[in-house]
Image: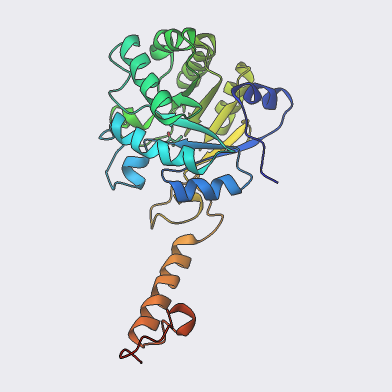
Amino acid sequence: MAKKKMTVLDFKKFKEEGRKFAYCTAYDYTTASIVDESEVEVILVGDSLGMIMLGYDTTVGVTLDDMIHHIRPVVKGAPNTFIAGDMPFGSYQESPEQAIRSACRILMETNCDCVKLEGGSNMAPTIKRMTDVGIPVMGHIGMTPQSATNFGGFKVQGGTPEGAAKLIEDARALEAAGVFSIVVECVPSGVAKAISQAVSVPILGIGAGPYVDCQVLVTQDLLDMYGDFKPKFVKHFAHVRKAMVEGLNAFHQETVDGTFPTPEFSFNKVVEGYEV
Ligand code: KIV
């Protein structure tokens, strides 16, 4: 039986009921359809697209058109999964009007379920304007990759009492601005727990320890597809890269030794003058 697609309202309900859920990324139709077949409740078409699919060093070069191009096939491939579309760098920072315009493009041109954007108290006025006009917004605080350069790279955030208090203030500001959930990335477990206790919307943790409402991972990370780079918070739940390389090598071997294709994989109609 197909799983039941979550709604924006279910996010808060799950938190109230203490029911945990899982969240992973997808950037294409095939992966989306595999996630849809799984029990994972939420897909993010993240701007991590830049690094995972396009080979960039950071997420900063990803454009709004890139995002829309990748969110569309994911929506097509995962009709039973809630889908968040990431707003890329430069598509919302200029003004609330720009943010509303970009979010409307994402929602209208892809039919995904919400947009996600990075930032805390600084982005709250923009997010308030967005939610006031009916745009479902997911927040993202802690290590926000679009600003990683300012943090001196991909580093744990909230590692001091002041930093932790600032994150709690950010989460409260986002909740007041109307977000329905907040991604918290690369934060010590105790701080993430305090953030989760400070707000009524679910905290979607990536590198934020176990005391949050949902766990987020990049699919290529959790399936061990990405290669040697493995952040501390990533657990490999399968070894898909190894399985793919083994499959490709088996194909190569049977091709070079002539054992593929057998008649089973060939069109065997005998054409006069072309017998084998
Ligand atoms: O783009 C992304 O994949 C993200 C996750 C790391 C939460 O923002």
Q: Residue 193 at x, y = what percent? A: 61, 27
Q: Quadrant of the C terminus?
A: bottom left
Which of the two residues, 167 or 87, is positioned nearer the viewer here?
Answer: 87
Residue in the image at 33% along x and 10% along y: 97
- Relative vertical location of residue 163 with respect to residue 130 in this rendering, above or below: below
Residue in the image at 47% along x and 56% along y: 224
159 sits left or right of 253 in the view? right
Q: Residue 171 at x, y = what percent? A: 52, 17
Residue 130 appears anywhere in the view: yes
Which of the two residues, 150 or 34, is positioned nearer the viewer here?
Answer: 34
Residue in the image at 34% along x and 20% along y: 102
Residue 42 occupies quadrant: top right
Residue that sits furthest to the front in the current view = 272
- Relative vertical location of residue 160 with respect to residue 248 in this rendering, above or below: above
Residue 39 occupies quadrant: top right
Q: How many marks?
A: 0
Residue that sits furthest to the right in the current view = 17
220 sits left or right of 213 in the view? left
57 sits left or right of 260 in the view? left
Indicate the quadrant of ligand 1 in the picture. Answer: top left
Residue 160 appears anywhere in the view: no
Q: Residue 50 at x, y = what percent? A: 31, 41
Q: Residue 75 at x, y = what percent? A: 48, 37
- Relative vertical location of residue 38 with respect to residue 272 in this rendering, above or below: above
- Relative vertical location of residue 152 with respect to residue 77 in this rendering, above or below: above
Which of the two residues, 276 or 250, is positioned nearer the viewer here?
Answer: 276
The chosen color scheme is rainbow
